[in-house]
Image: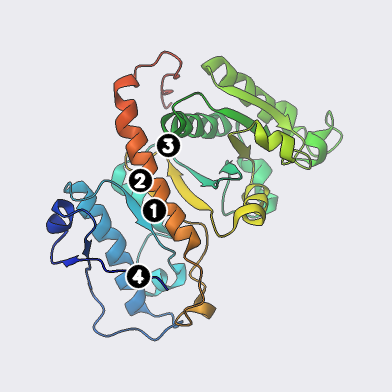
Amino acid sequence: LVRADIPVVSTAEAARDCPGSCWWDPHTLAAPPAPGVISAETGRASFAYVASAMEQLEQGNADAIVTGPIHKHAWQLAGIEYPGHTEFFVERCGAERHAMLLTSPEITCALVTTHVGLAEVSRLLTPDRIVEVIDLTGRYLSELLGRAPRMAVLGLNPHAGEQGRFGHREEERIISPAVETARLMGWSVDGPLSPDTAFLVERRRRTDAYICMYHDQGLIPLKTLAFDRGVNVTLGLPIIRTSVDHGPALDLAGTHQASTGSLFAACELAVRWFTSRIQSRSSRSDPCLPAVPSRH
């Protein structure tokens, strides 16, 4: 539980003009909800907060959005058509390309596929999608770091397929061509790497981001190394949006035992990203930054 003397103002506009203040919008809850209980009412309130944040950003009262966890079933009970935050922001922003990236001081991983079963991953992998994730990751890190990032692409199969011995030659047919295309675009990228040794300390020291083929390939190392410090970033949006790297933890609701580490990290990254974006706008025409590929 965090306690601080923070001035509370009555409108978002007032908060914008008063640095260090807080605007609290109670929104649609008629009464405090019971901790840990999923309901349509809390789902409606949760979505209303997310939509309100987007409205304030569109109106110029905010520079970035930091989201906490939502319970997707509560959104379903409330009749919300979006399965989660990301789909709402993608549609609201009209984003044609997007990807999920999880980051921490120890490791950064971008995901080619996200919430799908392992049996579906191979079918969903395409050279175009892998290149898209590499490009989105490279653009984000170039803006944040102020230099060209070093990226590593993982193989799908054990030992990165071992020349086709394992799997269905995804490394040769899909991943390697994507890596070559990304290099031709100007990105510094290695791979496909064998996943079982890709996260060793020496490799992590010289890698700014890993491009992972599926959810657990990236999230297991990240949450093992930095569970309380991980931040979820939505790549490809025209806005800055960061989030925590965990779910709502209903079993901890109302106990004052939940960690705020990831939320603080998400806030800090949003501020750093916004600052870097302002500083990099004058150099956006840098010839080292590849052109945004057209959609076909």
Residue 293 visible, this orientation? yes
Whole-angstrom CA distance, mark 3 to mark 2, is: 23 Å
Q: Quadrant of the N terminus?
A: bottom left
Whole-angstrom CA distance, mark 2 to mark 1, is: 6 Å
Count residues near mark 1 (Cα–Cα under 10 Å), then give few for <14, some for 14-19, many for 20+: many
Q: Tell me the residue that label 4 is attached to.
A: 79
Amino acid at dot 2: Val
For label 2, the SS is helix
In the rendered image, the vertical position of residue 171 relative to residue 20, given as above or below? above
- Asked whether, in this view, residue 24 is left or right of residue 176, the answer is left
In the rendered image, the residue lying farthest to the right is 165
**Residue 258 image offset from top left, x and y in percent:** 50, 72
- Residue drawn at 53 percent across, 17 percent down: 186
Whole-angstrom CA distance, mark 4 to mark 1, is: 29 Å
Q: Residue 296 carries which label?
A: none
Q: Tell me the residue that label 2 is attached to.
A: 271
Amino acid at dot 1: Cys
Q: Which mark is residue 97?
A: 3
> Which one is in front in this view, the residue at disc 1 or the one at disc 3?
1
- Residue drawn at 53 percent across, 55 percent down: 229
Amino acid at dot 4: Gly
Earlier residue among tags 3 and 2: 3
In the rendered image, the vertical position of residue 217 relative to residue 22, given as above or below? above
Q: Tell me the residue that label 1 is attached to.
A: 267
Disc 2 + disc 1, Cβ < 8 Å: yes
In the rendered image, the vertical position of residue 161 relative to residue 182, given as above or below? below
